[in-house]
Amino acid sequence: MHITKRSSEMKRSTRRFFIGGMMSSLSVLTYAHEGHDQMMQTQMNRSEQSSTVMDHSLRSSQIKSVQSKTAVQHQQHDHRREHGGQIYQATTLESAWTIDDHGRGSASTELKTWVGTDENKIFVKAHVEKAESKQADTEAKVLYSRNIADFWDVQAGVRYQYQSEQQQDQNQWSAVFGLHGLAPYFFETDAYVYAGQDQRWQLSLETSRDFLFTQKLIAQPYLNADIVLSDQSKYARKSGLAKLQTGIQMRYEISKKVMPFIDVAYAYSKGVKQTEWQTASQHEKGGLYGAGLTLKF
């Protein structure tokens, strides 16, 4: 009976040992599994961080590449064509025959041409006029024009004049400075100051505006005035308002390049001073009636 009792105790001890071993093994396995999960999570986090860094680096390199290409294209692109850098050209040729109240006729031809950009231009203007039984008088100007504001250019250059009736000093040169542009209410305006030899100082003003009756029939009132500030030359003109011509030109635009016109105007001339080389003259005034043709290229 004592043997039987001890045998039972050994069985219980063996069971306890076995169950304890099993619990220890499970604990070890659980701990190992958790360690493995933590290791895997750490590796996954490191992999994600590495992937994020690589994506960021790749994206940065792509952005830099795009910026570099954009910069190259920006340098190669000619921005002058987007900011008034194109070169333009326009030419106007006008010929007319005019008769005054006394029946005296004269023929005139005027050329205006310019070439350049919106900001910088070169103007060439020439005027030739020949009265009946007289030689032709010529005037030519070369001007540099620089845009300084909307619709306004400042101009500077030289003027040449050939006075056929003068026995001496037929060729005259003057410096020119002035403004060219569009005044309020769409008056196209040229205002110049001339400075020449023998203390010749002169102002000139030309202004005009178009009024449309139809798309082809257009009336153009105009005003041209010359003011002599000073003149000590051999063939001096009287100081003050030396010449004035104001009138209306009515043109019909067959096309934008061919435009016949008629002209009715009032003209005033103050005359010249008495000098050793000329006799003083009185002022003249009266009507002018003309017709002509304007060509544009």
Image (cartoon, rainbow, N blue to C red):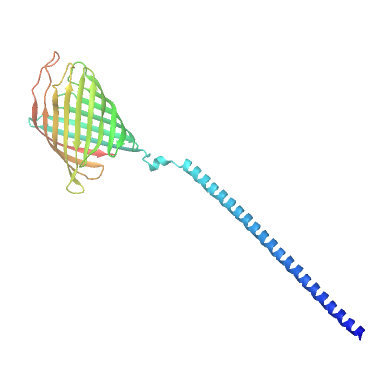
- Residue drawn 11% across the image and 31% down it: 267
Q: Which quadrant would residue 155 be assigned to in this image?
A: top left
Q: Is residue 175 visible?
A: yes
Quarter of the image with the N terminus is bottom right
Q: Which quadrant would residue 51 be assigned to in this image?
A: bottom right
Q: Is residue 132 visible?
A: no
Vertically, is 35 above or below 184?
Answer: below
> Which residue ends up furthest to the bottom in the rendered image?
1
- Residue drawn 14% across the image and 22% down it: 239
Horizontal and vertical percent position of residue 223 = 16, 35
Q: Would you say 42 lies left or right of 167 here?
A: right
Q: Which quadrant would residue 269 be assigned to in this image?
A: top left
Q: Nearer the viewer, residue 75 or 243?
A: 75
Horizontal and vertical percent position of residue 18 = 82, 75
- Residue drawn 23% across the image and 33% down it: 190
Q: Would you say 161 lies left or right of 263 here?
A: right
- Residue drawn 32% across the image and 37% down it: 89
Q: Nearer the viewer, residue 215 or 117?
A: 117
Horizontal and vertical percent position of residue 242 = 14, 26
Q: Would you say 118 lies left or right of 210 here?
A: right
Q: How many marks?
A: 0
> Which residue ends up furthest to the front in the rendered image?
2
Quarter of the image with the C terminus is top left
Q: Nearer the viewer, residue 56 or 93?
A: 56
Horizontal and vertical percent position of residue 153 = 28, 34
